[in-house]
């Protein structure tokens, strides 16, 4: 009897538990709390947090190559670059490029806000990260989850958990991180600027946009093809108005399904041995730095454009040039309406916001092409 | 007669006024919802509400008339 009991204990995971596992449990519990109680990106954070928990239960071998269940999700979904492009298909089916088409100069803001990414790239190198790791950390500044995962899984898979979690965390923290920068870099007078009504965009223009953008961007930066092709096809589905079933499948069912596998796999990369590493703290720090610099460069780009524009733009919308759709646009709207309650910047901010998504993908593609 | 226009596209979330109500400049009269964010709409004029052209749940475009103030 005692022998059987002893055997049970030895074959259980308990004896193989490490202190690191316990710390990772705590990390997981904190993330579960943030997801449920604070609703910080719960759709992603919850599967990520649960992935962290189960992978830190010893002897389950869920991430064991060629054997573990989650390893298969990870290998086929993320390592083979299937899931991030599918997320982009769903995003495309949801995004309205109308505000960008109505006001194409906001494309510059989407590009301007990518400066943080390049600044961070060099900062990370100074901190001792190698080029591929530095690129994966810098992309956090683009505030785009799937792009961050896509790039990191190709360049520095050992950092995947940390970069993905910080990208999603900072997106959820947009309303806390961005307003101080916005107030620091703009005057009260600038924040009060009311922008003129957006010109109406015809259905034809909306249909042409994904086709022309897909061709232009992929001809110029072929490495962006997996993400851009899916994004623009999703958008074409939506704007065509004739394939509602495909639009819905892309933006709801398929998106929800791949989100589960994405979250779980990303979480499962965070075993105690890979995650409890001083480097990870630096990643969170540098990611935040990237995000702040991107916000600042978007704002400054908008102010710079105002030097030449007769019809002034509200420089706050530059902050929406980091992707984080639509959190950043909402944040701009809120700060703008605090300065002047008749200021409705939401749709104006959506222009740079969706341009930021394209900007981040292009930046990632350039990094991938040169370092991959 | 002054009209209250929707400053952004969205869905009518809450209507805080009824026909016959007296409103002042800057009163919060309607709340629109766009991109999962509530946006209050303020009165441009003082007067009495003579007509409300939308109901809760309606989708409106930028520039649509929400209400008429007499």
Image (tube, coloured by chain):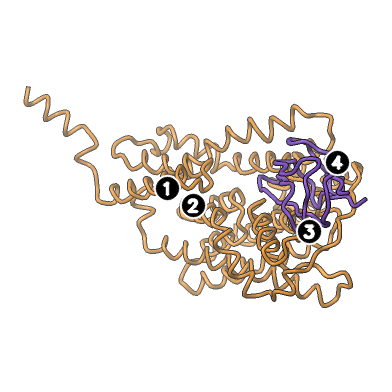
Which numbered circle lies on residue A165?
A: 2
Looking at the image, do the residues carrying marks 4 and 3 touch, with CB atoms under 8 Å apart? no
In the rendered image, what is the letter of the chain coloured purple?
B
Q: Of tags 1 and 4, which is closer to the observer?
A: 4
Residue A231, x across and y down, in percent = 72, 44
- The part of the image, by quadrant, that contains residue A221 is bottom right
CA–CA distance in space, label 2 to label 3? 46 Å
Picture mark count: 4
Vertical arrangement, residue A310 with respect to residue A237, above or below: below
Q: Are marks 2 and 3 on the same chain?
A: no
In the rendered view, does B66 fall on the left or right side of A188? Answer: right
Residues at marks 1 and 4, CA–CA distance in whole angstroms: 50 Å
Q: Residue at x 54, y 65 (%)?
A: A131
Spatial CA span between label 1 and label 3: 46 Å
Q: Residues within 10 Å of mark 3 (few under 14, many from 20)?
A: few
Q: Residues within 10 Å of mark 1 (few under 14, many from 20)?
A: many
For discs 1 and 2, the disc positioned in front in the rendered view: 1
**Residue at the top extreme of this rendering:** A1
**On the same chain: label 1 and label 2?**
yes
Query: Dot 1 corresponds to which residue?
Result: A31
Which chain did the image draw in orange?
A
């Amino acid at each position: 009897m005692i022998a059987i009991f002893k055997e049970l204990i030895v074959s259980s995971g308990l004896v193989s538990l490490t202190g690191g596992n316990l710390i990772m449990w705590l990390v997981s519990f904190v993330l579960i709390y943030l997801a449920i109680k604070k609703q910080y990106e719960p759709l992603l954070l919850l599967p990520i947090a649960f992935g962290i928990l189960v992978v830190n239960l010893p002897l389950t071998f869920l991430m064991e190559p060629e054997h573990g269940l989650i390893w298969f999700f990870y290998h086929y979904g993320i390592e083979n670059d299937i899931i991030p492009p599918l997320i982009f298909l769903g995003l495309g089916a949801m995004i309205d490029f109308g505000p960008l088409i109505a006001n194409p100069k906001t494309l510059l803001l989407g590009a301007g806000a990518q400066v943080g990414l390049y600044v961070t790239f060099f900062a990370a190198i100074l901190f001792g990260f190698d080029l591929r790791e530095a690129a994966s950390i810098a992309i956090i500044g683009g505030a785009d989850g799937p792009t961050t995962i896509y790039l990191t899984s190709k360049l520095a898979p050992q950092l995947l958990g940390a970069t993905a979690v910080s990208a999603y965390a900072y997106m959820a923290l947009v309303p806390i991180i961005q307003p101080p920068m916005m107030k620091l870099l703009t005057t009260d007078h600038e924040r009060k600027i009311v922008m003129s009504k957006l010109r109406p965009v015809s259905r034809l223009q909306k249909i042409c946009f994904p086709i022309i953008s897909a061709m232009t961007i992929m001809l110029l930066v072929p490495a962006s093809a997996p993400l851009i092709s899916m994004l623009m096809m999703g958008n074409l589905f939506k704007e065509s108005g004739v394939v509602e079933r495909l639009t819905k499948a892309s933006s709801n069912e398929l998106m929800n399904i791949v989100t589960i596998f994405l979250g779980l796999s990303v979480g499962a990369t965070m075993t105690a041995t890979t995650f409890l590493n001083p480097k990870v703290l630096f990643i969170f720090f540098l990611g935040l730095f990237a995000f702040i610099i991107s916000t600042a460069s978007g704002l400054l780009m908008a102010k710079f454009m105002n030097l030449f524009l007769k019809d002034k733009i509200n420089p706050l919308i530059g902050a929406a040039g980091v992707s984080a759709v639509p959190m950043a646009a909402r944040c701009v709207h809120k700060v703008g309406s605090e300065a002047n309650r008749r200021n409705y910047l939401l749709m104006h901010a959506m222009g740079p916001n969706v341009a930021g998504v394209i900007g981040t993908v292009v930046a990632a593609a350039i990094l991938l092409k040169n370092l991959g | 007669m002054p009209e209250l226009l929707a400053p952004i596209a969205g869905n009518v979330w809450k209507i805080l006024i009824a026909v016959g109500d007296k409103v002042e400049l800057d009163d919060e009269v309607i709340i629109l919802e766009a991109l999962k964010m509530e946006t209050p709409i303020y009165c441009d004029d003082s007067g009495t509400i003579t007509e409300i052209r939308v109901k809760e749940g309606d989708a409106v475009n930028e520039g649509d008339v929400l209400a008429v103030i007499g």
